[in-house]
Amino acid sequence: VVLKPANIPVSGNYSRTVTRALPANLSPSPELDAMPWPHPVHRLDGPTTGLLVVAKTRTAAADLGKQFEARAVEKQYYAVVAGHMSGEGVIQEPLDDRPAETRFRVQETSRSASYGWVSALDLFPHTGRTHQLRRHLALLGHPIVGDTQYGEASQNTQNNRLLLCATGITLHHPNTGSELSLSITPPDKFAAWVRHEENAWAKDIYNPAN
């Protein structure tokens, strides 16, 4: 499992991709069915950072592919969205004429100079439609901060940073079958942006002439 940087695509016809970088950064497998180079077994949007599962052998790639296809892999994301949200719930809006389901849980809300309010969420997609989390939250009226595709132009962070991170993944190890659960904390830049927005809001409230 590798930590994918933001704004680098997993694969595709680009000079910089995660797939191109893997051979120089991961040692090859000693197994007989080792692949020529490591292969990501699922996708993350280009602007999204976080945990990405990579297979080194054909056996692992096949097993992990089946787990993802059967929706046996549990994925967790963290996002900062525009607007005030509370509690938890489920978004069940079809995407591309196919069922799509995302569960969310609000962690905190903060005042924001740019949006009035922003909310930090944990997200748990049950399905894996293209741009599912970004589209679902936009349909809910709370686009992810920094989303230039599904949000408004004014809802961009510095350098167009999308505040979305794949923070957790639970699957079964393709060799042992044992459950493997990994998690990370969101990038410090996410919290720093929220605090900056909160401070800017307070400054505007107490110094309206500015």
Image (tube, helix red, strand yellow):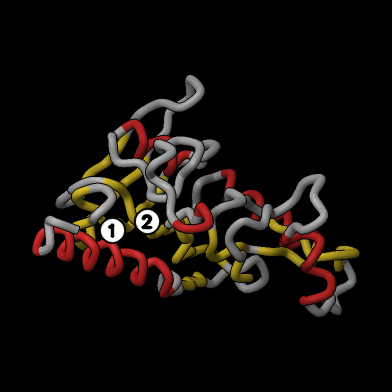
2 and 1 marks in contact (CB < 8 Å): yes
In this rendered view, identify the residue nearer to me: 174 or 154.
Answer: 154
Residue farthest front in this picture: 209
Q: Residues within 10 Å of mark 1 (few under 14, many from 20)?
A: many
Percent x, y for residue 197? 28, 62
The residue depicted at 63 percent of the width and 70 percent of the height is: 2
Between residue 204 and residue 176, name the one nearer to us: 204
- Left or right: where 58 falls relative to 82: right
Q: Which residue is mark 2?
A: 79
Determine whether the residue tagged by mark 1 lies in a helix, strand or loop: strand
Q: Identity of the amino acid at label 1?
A: Ala
Q: How many marks?
A: 2
Would residue 123 appear left or right of 46 to someone viewing this image?
left
Marks 2 and 1 sit apart, C-alpha to C-alpha, by 6 Å
Q: Position of residue 72 (x, y in %)?
A: 50, 52
Q: Is residue 193 above or below residue 103?
A: below
Q: Residues within 10 Å of mark 2 (few under 14, many from 20)?
A: many
- Horizontal arrangement in the rendering, residue 130 relative to residue 186 (left or right): right
- From this view, report whether residue 92 is shown above or below residue 126: above
Write the residue at 44% across / 38% down: 153
The label number, if any, that marks residue 120 in the structure image: 1
Instruction: Determine the residue positioned at 29% across, 41% down.
Output: 142
Question: Which type of secondary structure does the marked residue at label 2 adopt?
Answer: strand
Amino acid type of the residue tagged 2 in the rendering? Ala
Which residue is at 9% across, 64% downward? 206
Q: Closer to the camera, 143 or 12?
A: 143
Q: Position of residue 190 (x, y in %)?
A: 39, 66
Q: Quadrant of the C terminus?
A: bottom left
